[in-house]
Amino acid sequence: MRDTHDAAAHHVRFGAAQVTPAEVVALARGQARAALSDDPAFVARITAGAELLDRILREDGVIYGVTTGYGDSCDVAVPPDLVDELPHRLFTYHGCGMGASFTREETRAILAVRLASLCRGSSGVSIKLLQALAALLERDVLPVIPSEGSVGASGDLTPLSYVAAVLCGEREAWSAHGSAPVAAAVALDAAGLAPIRLRPKEGLALMNGTAAMTGLACLATARAESLCGLASRITALSALALESNAYHFDATLFAAKPYPGMARIAASIAADLGYQSDAQERNSARLQDRYSIRCAPHVIGVLADALPWMRSHVELELNSANDNPLVDVDSGRVLHGGHFYGGHMAFAMDSMKNAVANIADLLDRQMALLVDSRYNNGLPSNLRGATGERAAINHGLKALQISVSAWTAEALKLTMPASVFSRSTECHNQDKVSMGTIAARDCLRIIALTEQVAAALLIATRQACALRHPDGLPDGCGPGLRAALARLEELVPFVKEDRRLDLDLARLLEAIRADDPALLP
């Protein structure tokens, strides 16, 4: 995953058109740059929303979060001469986040999602605020945002308070060329930017939304999709090393239970193994292979079939107005609701957690088969590369299998759905909350652990295939599998004598998170 901006990257334009999760990911990884639309119709719509709030304020004098306190304090009237100060107070008292800060990649995703939402034109913000938010992305001035402190309704208030604060020149930020955070005012100045003054409602509009959980969900969706392909390729490598039966992946078999994602995974494994549907020969002494090989499409396919609806939820949330209240320019009304509630994101991330962790568990079982001489069909114990008298002091991948088990256990432990742990907060005003940001954070952690499991399996299958086929792969193997194994041979030397493997794992993780095309189907 990249963490620097590419000057030659294409632009993602924020305006009336919708933004895709893939574009958010490209922005987050520095593969694209942000630009705010200057289309006159878009500018006019944004301006009309801000002017509507000004008009209602002049004529009626009462707007939630503008002339009143926030949340349970909505009945507290704010004196007219203090209205301009209220947005500053909102982000100030929400400055209580804790825990590790979001990464630069995650922070860019959060900024991009908040900008996309405010561009819907229903939040009553000024075009100047959108320009200032877009400038943070354009100049890569990134607020330092603690990851803990959001219950996911009333939106991601505490995390997003750090965005509002940095726009106003307060708290800390990463500058484009610095390796450590600096004072926000310093980072803005270095980028040629100046702090802004928030208009009434703009603090609420920035903070009262689902940008943190949705930004993380965009990243999680992209990484989960890559894991589907990687897990299918690893399964093919495991099957090859174990001399498993390729007919378990026959297209006719999967036509009888026609989940499209599951069928795609089976077809990918079959193609890697060079299997033809009219072949009936058995490769193994066993009529049926163990479930971690035979049922791999059924495990990986759950995520493959769920990803389309997960992605659609993320895209809808990304392109929605999700603060409160909203303004309707056409009718001239201010509408009070609860679109800050992140229930759909919470459910998508909790569901993704489960599906991804099951893939970690599947690969963990494949690892157990590969290293155990009772089940690996004649391979050395622990895939040991040393022979002769030196075999006695070499232990092969014994410790790697233990680490895989530890990572898998941690991933499985985190699958408890966060969304069922709603807490009543803020004097029982926020008495039902989504926990969407916790779900998204857990999901990314499970994905990271599963990527580590996958990296270990790449070492194991590379080792096992070299031991099984020292003179080269069988003629029937597919070109994709051959290319993947050749890439693995570049990244991971054969383990003949015991050595540390953490550097190999780190190298493979970098390739996995960069979506190395040779490793993916």
Image (tube, rainbow, N blue to C red):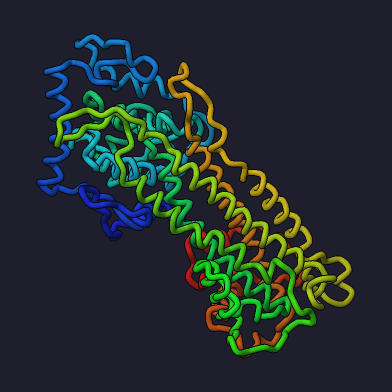
Residue at 42 percent across and 39 percent down: it is 212
Q: Is residue 375 left or right of residue 62?
A: right
> Which x, y percent locates residue 302?
56, 60
Residue at 17 percent across and 38 percent down: it is 46
* 100 to 509, vertically: above or below: above
> Which x, y percent locates residue 329?
16, 35
* 506 to 340, vertically: above or below: below
Q: Is residue 167 left or right of residue 410?
A: left
Q: Quadrant of residue 490?
A: bottom right
The answer to whether residue 500 is seen in the rendering is yes
Q: Is residue 439 left or right of residue 10?
A: right
> Which x, y percent locates residue 37?
18, 48
Q: How many marks?
A: 0
* 285 to 47, vertically: above or below: below
The answer to whether residue 4 is seen in the rendering is no
* 28 to 419, vertically: above or below: below
Residue at 73 percent across and 54 percent down: it is 405
